[in-house]
Every structure is written in C-alpha cells, then in structure tokens.
Amino acid sequence: MTSRTQLHADLPLHFTTSQGQQAGVGLGRMRGRDLSAPFHGVRSSQPVAEGNPADIIRTRAEQYAPRLRPGQFFCESTALVLLGLPIPGREPIDVVHVGVRPPHNPPRTRGVRGHQYGVDAISGRLPHCQPLEAWIQCASRMNLDDLIMIGDGLVCRRRPLVTLGEMESAVLAARGARGAVRLEEAFGLVRPGTDSPMETLWRLVIRRGGLPEPLVNAPVWDARGRSLGIGDMVYPQWRVVIEYEGGYHFATDTQIHDDINRLASFVDAGWTVIRIDKGHFAQRGVILRRIRLALTKAGWRD
C-alpha cells in the first residue's frame, strides 16, 4: 500500500490550491481523504468543530481566510463571532459573511454570502468589521430579541467592546437604513452590565410578563450596608434576587462552593433567592408566577 505524501511543513492548516501547487503539492494529493474542500479552491487539514455553533463559524472563517482578496473582510454575524459576541441559535452555521467596500463586487461562491459595505475593517489575519458596524449590519434580518442580546453583549460587564454612548451615536447615524426602526427599538432595551445571553432573554421575559424590570448584575447587601456579592437580576427595593445557573457556575469545585456560600449569605440577610436554569425557559409562566409572588410578599403592587 502506497503511503500518503506528507504536506509541505510551511503549508498552513487552510490553504488555496494555488498555494498548494506552489509548495509542490499535486492536484491528486489535494484530493486526499485527509483534506477537505470547505470552499472552492481551498483545502483544509483541520476538521470543522462540532457542537458549538460559534466554534463552527469561526473555523469556517479561518478556512475561507486564504481566499480573501485585498480589501475584503468578514462582516455581519461572522464578524460578531470573531469578536466573541453571542449570536442567535438559528443563525446558519454553514454560511460565511464576507464584505467589500464599493465599488468592488462582493464574492460569490458556495457557502459564502457577499455584501457591499462602506466601512473600514479591523485588519489582521481574520479582518472583520468594527463591533457596532457588524451589529447594525444584522438589523435588517435579525429579530428584536436577537439584536437586544447582541447589544447587551457589546456593553457587557466584563470587557465591553463599546460604551452605551457610542452605541447611541451609531444607532442615530444609521437612521434611514434598512432595519433602523428595529435597531432603535433594540437600543432602548439594551442594558449594560450583563454577563450572558440568557440573562438578557430572562430580563425580557420578566419585563414582558408585566413585572418590574430587575437590575442586572447589581450589588446585594445586608442590613448594615455590607456588600454580600453580585446578583444576576436584582430587585433592591423588594430584596429579591433571581440567579441564572449557567454552566460556568459549575465549572470548578471552588466556583460551586463560592456560589453556595454567596447565595446562602443573601438568604441569611433576608433576601429571597429564585434560582433558574436553561430548562426553566420552557416553564416561563411558572417562573413568572414565582417572581410575582416573591415581589408581592415583599410589598410590590401591580
């Protein structure tokens, strides 16, 4: 049995067929089963990640990168992923969004959606749009909640990419563009300081359920005014905390231990703690009734 010819050591994980030929790799070798053809004229020796949609989209962008021509860049939801922002679960994972400034023509090939945008991209190995530009580009096709979720991610608690003032200026500048009305509505519901998309979605559920909107990632204190920690969604006036138990809460034994102690200190100080997880999203009515009961007992009146 003939052994497979090793690829040239200088070839990257993803390369064009032209790069392969220049490195002495024949067309027959580039049809080998250990190489995939994710895009026309591209070969890859790295399989696409499975499971996490963001990882899949990032890998697809890395595979397409050798095909990028000068002036082309990743845009829309592909740029959002490269920036580490959340994207909707319904966003197609097999499509890469590539932009180019007018008057150049956008690319047209299988697995790619080309666009013309008059923006300046962030340069680098994977050039992409600025954060606010990528968000605004998605306004014409994403729904309101998706835009709010991404907007919250832009002004999140840890390492925000923009300020609320910068976001407001960008939204005002986009008036008249496709999706501008929805974008303005989304901006009005963006809240700085969130930690996860699920915090955003639960906040919207609570608001639309006729309950007061909680503060996100707000401090919790005892009767003496001493800080007990940060609560995910907090009603300071009625001393009610809603904690979303994401996977990061169970990442390590230390994290689990700290969370147990933190929530116990809330209860000891007279706060009502309501714990929810992703499974409760299908039981939103039950959780809303639970929150309403806790607020009512604390003195809130509808």
Image (spheres, grey):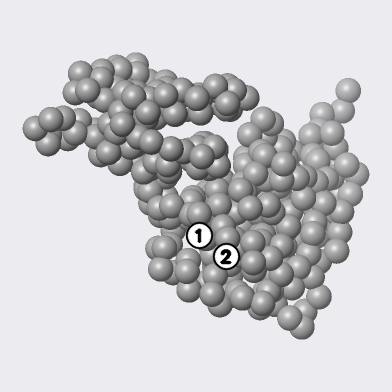
The x, y position of residue 87, in whole percent, is 61, 46
The residue identified by callout 1 is 188
- For the point 58% across and 60% down, the residue is 185
Identify the element where label 2 is drawn: helix
The x, y position of residue 63, in whole percent, is 71, 50
The image's mark for residue 131 is none
> Which residue is more in the foreground, 244 or 56?
244
Q: Are marks 1 and 2 in contact (CB under 8 Å)?
A: yes
Q: Amino acid at mark 1?
A: Gly
Q: Quadrant of residue 52?
A: top right
Separation (CA) of disc 1 from disc 2: 6 Å
The residue identified by callout 2 is 184
Q: Quadrant of residue 57?
A: top right
In the rendered view, would you say 41 is above or below 119?
Answer: above
Observer able to see residue 143:
yes
Extreme-bottom residue of the structure:
103
Quadrant the C terminus occupies: top left
> Which residue is more in the foreground, 8 or 113?
113
Observer able to see residue 254:
no
> Which residue is more in the foreground, 116 or 175?
175
Left or right of 168 in this view: 94: right
Q: Quadrant of residue 7?
A: top right
User: Crowding near pointer 2: few (<14 within 10 Å), some, many (20+)?
Assistant: some
Q: Amino acid at mark 2?
A: Glu
Left or right of 153 in this view: 267: left
Quadrant the N terminus occupies: top right
